[in-house]
Image: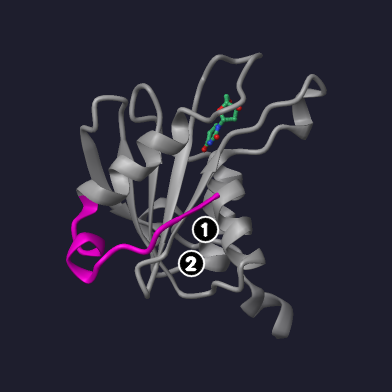
Amino acid sequence: MQTQGLTPIEAADPAHLVAQALAARQRAYAPYSGYQVGAAVLCADGTVILGCNVENAAYPATICAERVALTAAVAQGRRDLVAIAVATRDGGSPCGTCRQVMAELGPEMVVYITDAQGRYRTTTVRALLPDGFSGASLQR
Ligand code: THU
């Protein structure tokens, strides 16, 4: 899912990205947990790429909203990821697997975590995953 590019002013305003994550959350396919999640990734040029969680009757086949958005960004040729907004009903924090993928694809990203009412907090990938494993280890 991709949305129209934001203007620079909109891109600088986290509320716009948070609103996109809230909209993406409405598309969640979560019949098993009922826990709907939306994500919106902001690229340097203002493009926003959306994701939602997509569950499966074979539970481990479920994919989180953040990874849907992040992998879609890569598939669309995007590597310039500057921020991600994540929306849940309660402002829940991203899971460990999603943090690892954020660190791989957007280590400099700012992360906005919002509840369903749009009350958000601001953090970073570096704060969410300190001392994480990275490709640097594979090059030594
Ligand atoms: N979920 C996400 O989409 N992102 C996270 O970071 C945590 C969990 C989803 C997976 C599953 O569909 C539901 O939330 C409950 O775990």
Would residue 113 be counted in the magenta stretch?
no
Q: Residue at x 73, y 77 (%)?
A: 138
Q: Residue at x 52, y 30 (%)?
A: 27
75, 37: nearer the viewer: 75
In the picture provided, is 71 more to the left or to the right than 11?
right
Q: Are marks 1 and 2 in contact (CB under 8 Å)?
A: yes
Tell me residue 14's x, y (percent).
23, 53
* Above or below, 121 relative to 130: above
Tell me residue 18's x, y (percent).
30, 44
Task: Give the residue at the far right of this rendering.
Answer: 58
Residue numbers of the magenta segment: 1-14
Tell me residue 40's x, y (percent).
43, 49
Label 2: how many Cα within 10 Å (few below 14, some 14–19, many 20+): many
The quarter of the displayed image where residue 93 is located: top left
The residue identified by callout 1 is 102
The quarter of the displayed image where residue 56 is located: top right
Question: Ligand 1 sits in which quadrant?
Answer: top right
Going by the numbered disc 1, the residue's amino acid type is Met
58, 133: nearer the viewer: 58
Q: Residue at x 55, y 14 (%)?
A: 34
In the picture, the disc for residue 106 is: 2
* Above or below, 68 relative to 6: above
* Above or below, 25 relative to 105: above
At numbered mark 1, what does the secondary structure look like: helix, strand or loop? helix
